[in-house]
């Protein structure tokens, strides 16, 4: 599926894990095969991490699939069997649109981390803020969603979680953006089953 307006589903994907505790939720690839994963899950101790590189927040106005994916992802992580009335705490940069998006989706929000069953950490936070937030919520052994990681925050997450997390930067040629044909070097996601 190619997302509007420029066909990009994600700008950076994770190298598809092999032989690690990471589980691929969504595959992506291109002419060289399905070797990338923009959506991963990691079970660690009694908690779980969702690592998401999908272009969700900046596509909600142009791509209906982005809202559908966000709603389903939140529904899945906020309704575990042991916590049917989940609340989310969002740790985002000050100018992030994520808090408004979550409010529009009527997500139950927690102001304090001890009240949250799920913590969403935006990877575009400063490296220092990202590391501090991740190390603070890690001992709680709850669900943590890491969204929109940068190379720096992916490296921090890999070090703290002790798993290999490698990003691949997707490329797009300007001449393909206006073309009706899909670009040949852009990752194409498979449909989640």
Image (cartoon, grey):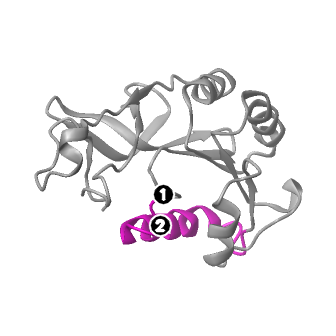
Going by the image, does 36 lie left or right of 108?
left
Q: Is residue 95 above or below residue 184?
A: below
Q: Residue at x 27, y 41 (%)?
A: 187
Q: Is residue 142 above or below residue 129?
A: below
Residue underneath mark 2: 60
Going by the image, does 33 lie left or right of 165?
left
Quadrant the C terminus occupies = bottom left
Q: Residue at x 66, y 24 (%)?
A: 156
For numbered disc 1, what is the local secondary structure? loop
Q: Which residues are magenta?
A: 59-86
Report the front residue among 142 and 119. 119
Residue underneath mark 1: 56
Label 2, label 1: how far apart the Cα atoms are: 6 Å
**Which quadrant of the figure has residue 42?**
top right
**Which quadrant of the figure has residue 15?**
top left
Q: Residue at x 18, y 43 (%)?
A: 176
Q: Is residue 147 above or below residue 88?
A: above
Find out whether residue 67 is within the magenta segment: yes
Report the front residue among 12 and 80. 12
Q: Is residue 76 above or below residue 134?
A: below
Going by the image, does 172 lie left or right of 126?
left
């Amino acid at each position: 599926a190619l997302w509007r307006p420029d066909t990009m589903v994600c700008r950076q994907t994770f190298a598809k894990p092999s032989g690690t505790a990471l589980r691929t939720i969504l595959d992506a690839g291109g002419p060289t095969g399905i070797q990338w994963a923009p959506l991963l899950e990691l079970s660690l101790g009694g908690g779980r991490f969702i690592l998401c590189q999908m272009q969700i927040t900046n596509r909600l106005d142009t791509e209906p699939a982005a809202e559908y994916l966000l709603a389903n992802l939140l529904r899945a992580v906020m309704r575990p069997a042991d916590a049917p009335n989940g609340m989310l705490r969002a740790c985002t940069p000050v100018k992030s649109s994520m808090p408004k998006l979550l409010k529009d989706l009527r997500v139950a929000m927690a102001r304090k981390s001890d009240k949250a069953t799920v913590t969403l950490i935006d990877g575009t936070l400063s490296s220092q803020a990202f590391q501090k937030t991740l190390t603070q919520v890690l001992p709680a052994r709850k669900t943590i969603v890491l969204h929109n990681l940068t190379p720096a925050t992916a490296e921090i997450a890999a070090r703290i979680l002790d798993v290999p997390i490698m990003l691949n930067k997707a490329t797009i040629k300007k001449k393909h953006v206006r073309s009706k044909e899909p670009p040949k070097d852009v990752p194409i996601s498979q449909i989640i089953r």
